[in-house]
Image (cartoon, grey):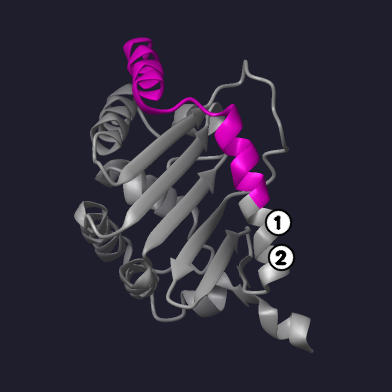
């Protein structure tokens, strides 16, 4: 019973029952409560770093309940990004090369998206790491997850195709912390990561 309480899975149909925009508001509340947010993304650019057209296409793909408030949801996602400028909070984003290269739209969309990554990487409270394919993998890149540092608790959220999983149990949370540390060892950081993104942007046809 304790483990069932400590790990919860909720269907996206339930989470989206009030619309995609309402879900963005709920995530924004969590971001405002957190003192630190650590994100691993092996498949795409995380929502807090997305430009508008990228966000629109991603949210259109991830809409299993066919909600109709896509434009409002995109606007809410962009509003969420103001939290990045709150110097009281720390943000860490680790992306695989596949996530940075995944292209949901035309070349001009990706140029804008990569420019956004470079811009956000310059913020003093943001760390952006890129794990290139040509480096030895110290762990498997199984799925995206976010570690939220909240007052008195650490929460991990994991998104799957059909459900959102919330992990509260400290022993389970520790697994994600250890995995993040191995990802950090494989990643490029700071100027090296920015140069890699700039090189990739220059090759977009």
Residue placed farthest to the bottom in the image? 1
For the residue carrying disc 2, how many other residues have a C-alpha within 10 Å: few (<14), some (14-19), or many (20+)? Answer: some
Q: Position of residue 124 (x, y in %)?
A: 25, 41
Residue of label 1: 175
Q: Is the magenta stretch mostly helix, strand or loop?
A: helix
Q: Position of residue 8 (x, y in %)?
A: 65, 77
Residue 172 left/right relative to 74: right
Of 41 and 2, nearer the camera is 2
Question: In 3D space, how far apart are the residues under numbered discs 2 and 1 (Cα atoms)?
Answer: 5 Å
Please provide the residue range marked out in magenta.
178-205
The correct choice, above or below, for 168 with respect to 42 in the image is below
Q: Residue 127 sits in which quadrant?
A: top left
Of 195 and 13, nearer the camera is 195
Residue 70 left/right relative to 16: left
The quarter of the image holding the N terminus is bottom right
Residue of label 2: 172
The correct choice, above or below, for 4 with respect to 43 in the image is below
Are the two marked residues, 2 and 1, in contact with CB atoms closer than 8 angstroms? yes
Mark seen at residue 164: none
At a point 48% along the width and 25% down the height, the residue shown is 188
At a point 40% along the width and 81% down the height, the residue shown is 18
């Amino acid at each position: 019973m304790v483990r069932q309480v400590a790990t919860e899975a909720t269907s996206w149909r339930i989470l989206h029952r009030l619309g995609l925009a309402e879900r963005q508001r709920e995530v924004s509340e969590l971001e405002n409560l957190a003192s630190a947010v650590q994100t691993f993304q092996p498949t795409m650019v995380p929502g807090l770093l997305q430009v508008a057209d990228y966000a629109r296409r991603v949210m259109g793909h991830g809409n299993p309940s066919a909600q109709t408030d896509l434009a409002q949801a995109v606007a809410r996602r962009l509003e969420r990004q103001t939290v990045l400028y709150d110097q009281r909070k720390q943000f860490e984003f680790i992306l695989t090369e596949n996530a940075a290269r995944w292209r949901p739209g035309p070349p001009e969309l990706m140029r804008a998206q990569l420019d956004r990554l470079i811009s956000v990487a310059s913020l003093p409270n943001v760390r952006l790491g890129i794990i290139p394919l040509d480096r030895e993998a110290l762990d498997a890149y199984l799925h995206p997850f976010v570690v939220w540092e909240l007052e008195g608790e650490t929460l991990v959220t994991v998104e799957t195709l059909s459900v959102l999983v919330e992990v509260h149990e400290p022993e389970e949370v520790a697994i994600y912390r250890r995995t993040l540390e191995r990802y950090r060892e494989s990643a490029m950081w700071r100027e090296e990561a920015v140069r890699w993104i700039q090189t990739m942007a220059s090759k977009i046809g």
